[in-house]
Amino acid sequence: MIAKAEQTGVPILELQRQRALLQMEYEEERRTFMQHKEAIGMQRLVSRGDAWLPVRIGKSYYNSLNQLCVEVFRNVTEEDTDHNFEFGRPVQFFKTQPQPQTGITALFSGTVSYVDGDRMVVSVPDNAALADLQVSEGQIGIQLSFDETSYRLMFEALERTMRAKGRLGYLRDLFYSRQQAAAFTFPDMGFDYLNKTQERAVNEVLRAKDVAIVHGPPGTGKTTTLVEAIYETLRRESQVLVCAQSNMAVDWISEKLVDRGLNVLRIGNPTRVDDKMLSFTYERRFEAHPDYPHLWAIRKAIRELRSQRKRSDNWHQKMDRLKSRATELEIRINAELFGEARVIACTLVGSANRLLDGMKFGTLFIDEAAQALEAACWIPIRRAGRVIFAGDHCQLPPTVKCYEALKGGLGRTLMERIASEKPEVVTLLRIQYRMNEDIMRFSSDWFYHNQMVAAPEVQHRSILDLDRPITWIDTSEYEGKEEFIGESFGRINKTEAMLTILSLQAYFELIGKERILQERLDVGIISPYRAQVQYLRQQIRKREFFKPFRSFISVNTVDGFQGQERDIIVISLVRSNDEGQIGFLRDLRRMNVAITRARMKLIILGDRPTLTRHPFYQKLWEYVEELKIEN
């Protein structure tokens, strides 16, 4: 069948289609980025978290990777809590003029090397005019630039895959056909601390010669299963590559692998910065190597030699000698670091890092694979003999901004494609350990063919006796309507926001202050709309009642809560209009994430007449009403 697929060129045609759709997405995202940048103004960029203004410039120095770096501090106001700067993102420094009407002057570009709250380190070119950052008039700021690099790497990966022979060519043809994936046959191994479906998933990963999929619905212990599968694989292989779409997902799996006792080398800097996370980054390990002080001294000598205006006759000989010694030391340090590591961890795009040039791995694990564009997955696949996908295509999909590309199938992931073509390689984890059974059941029925089961220890978990696990407060009775804030900022419903705050306060009063503090009950307030999230944050900060509990309450978008859980979840759905328009609330996978974050109590606020014109929300409303009768 693979031979037939090759003859008909199906894989190549599919990859060409992916390339065309990716091109549409690239053009749309670039156009939108430039349009917003010009149209919405600097203050809006700041409030969206896409710019810092003003900033204070700290020290400049060369880091252990020999990159010139600049330290940047944000001047924080109470409103500025969120931002979108993270490791690897391209940025641009700019200067404002004393008179606002004269606009801004672009200075030079860089790449985020490290972010910790309101402090950021940016790597810049060696020839960057750092003197421009010292101004007597106006202010210095920094803003996100359009990310050309990720798209370039995805286009290159598609081209390489289309041309591929050997193992990459084999996997390409296998993934685009109904050919059965090859597998070993051996008896099941037992793992005392895994349940039966987790145990089966690990065994299927070990048997797979080509591909396996671990499908993990909310709360089913996907990470636990994946860590065990990696651990067992490393009893048979010397090293594996572990990737995920986002830095946060890479951090999470890396931390769990470190806890399991594995030597992890993290390429790139973590999103959450603490000593434990930093200790397994490549940069920190590199500078901790015994040979590093010697290398640093040689690099310093090279920089001093470069800065000499009067160059002696033997200048080139000295420079060549120093460079040769620096390269030799760098190769030696890298050989030791990569030789010792059992797991190399990075984002999908990060797997193109020059540090991995020439490296091959028996197994590639892709976590949160259902959030990754197909083209991004092909970046690391070229380095692997076989691929293990883990994720849930019923939760957050990849972000696709171009409607035409989405309609054409860009949002369909490689994991989804393989799961539909080769159901035999998929293992569904069925037992969940997070939610009260009533919270779980609706998601299980709608998304997972009623296959999920609540573990006995969580089946009836609740905060209050005789409490209903799910409440839907119909906000249509309060006549609050959605508003549209700016062309690109999103929707807000202030009446619903106040009802959200009051509903949480009322529930807190039922539980009692002492108990909340003593048991450290945590709360997540979720809204699909960023404008509503920011407004809710402001209201929580202003309200005196919540002062003792602020550290237990987090407010974020659905995407911001992916992979997380809370004792209490409150969802503000925002949409309220006479036409029944619900926008991207039609993306039910996002709603699946939102309603499955709660361990014990789920409170939904939404305009019933607007939302229930859609069958999903009608069914959810009916389900919540049935629970009233049952309880």
Image (tube, helix red, strand yellow):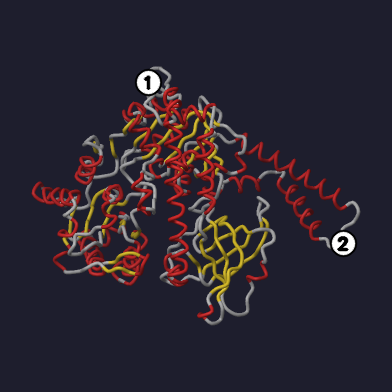
Q: Going by the picture, which residue comes out furthest to the right?
A: 313
Query: Closest to the observer: 181 or 55?
Result: 181
Q: Which residue is mark 2?
A: 310
Q: Quadrant of the N terminus?
A: top left
Q: Is residue 37 above or below residue 466?
A: below
Q: Which residue is mark 1?
A: 188
Mark 1 residue type: Asp
Residue pictured at 77% horizontal, 50% vertical: 298
Mark with earlier residue (1, 2):
1
Left or right: residue 212 versus residue 110 is: left
- Whole-percent x, y for residue 560 in the image: 38, 54
Give neighbour class at mark 1: few <14, some 14-19, many 20+ (Cα, 10 Å).
few
Q: Going by the picture, which residue comes out furthest to the top?
A: 186
Q: Going by the picture, which residue comes out furthest to the bottom?
A: 99
Q: Is residue 475 above or below residue 333?
A: below
Name the mark on residue 74.
none
